[in-house]
Image: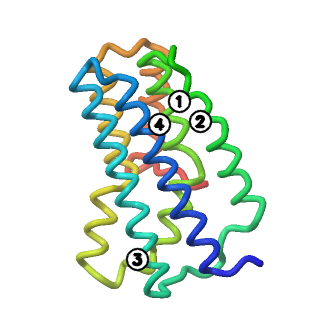
Amino acid sequence: MKTPKNVYRRFVEFEERAAAIYLRLASQFSRDPKLSSFWLDMAMHEKQHAGLLQFCLGEGLFASDLPDSAGIQKVASLFKRLEKRAADPKLTADEAFLLAVELETSELNYIYCYLTTTLHTSMYLLRRKIATSLPNHIDELLATARKFGVRNDAMKELNRLKERCSPNGRERA
């Protein structure tokens, strides 16, 4: 049965899985402390997302019009694919950034933003949400990709993502 509590629990789980993917990348690229640190920071952002959703769950701060079963299944399928790719010991830095682009542009982030709209009544919680928002992730991905010489195809995708997620052209799923 699709109850608000069950939906929020599922999305807490998804945010934790996103963090686990980034932690895996931090381990995979541990020979490069700066790159590893970047992936660790991305994981911590996802942990904060999970925490904000957990707070909504605990306080009963539920959004209306929750995602349907098909939307939830789509996100679950995405994670199966991304977790498999992240587990590949031959994953390159370019591939890791493309994986991150796919994760950051997925419905998960748009649904997270919607599910946490109930936090907007608290200035502190709204600031926490803004601090871990999608444009910040994209800026970090792009800057770090440049720093580590990510190839053109990955950079083109990151730049397209940045344009779509800018305040003037923000895309909604």
Residue 52, located in which quarter of the rendered image? Answer: bottom left
Q: In what element is the residue under mark 2? A: helix
Q: In what element is the residue under mark 3? A: helix
Point out the tag, 2 or 3, that comes first from the N-terminus: 3
Image position, residue 23 (x, y; %)? 39, 39
Front position among marks 1 and 4: 1
Residue 50, located in which quarter of the rendered image? Answer: bottom left
**Total number of numbered labels?**
4
Label 2 – label 4 distance at C-alpha? 18 Å
Q: Mark 2 points at which residue?
A: 82
Label 3 – label 1 distance at C-alpha? 29 Å
Q: Mark 4 points at which residue?
A: 161
Comparing 21 with 144, the one in front is 21
Residue at position x 46%, y 25% in the image:
96
- Which amino acid type corresponds to the residue marked 2 in the rendered image? Leu
Residue at position x 22%, y 26% in the image:
34
Q: Mark 1 points at which residue?
A: 86
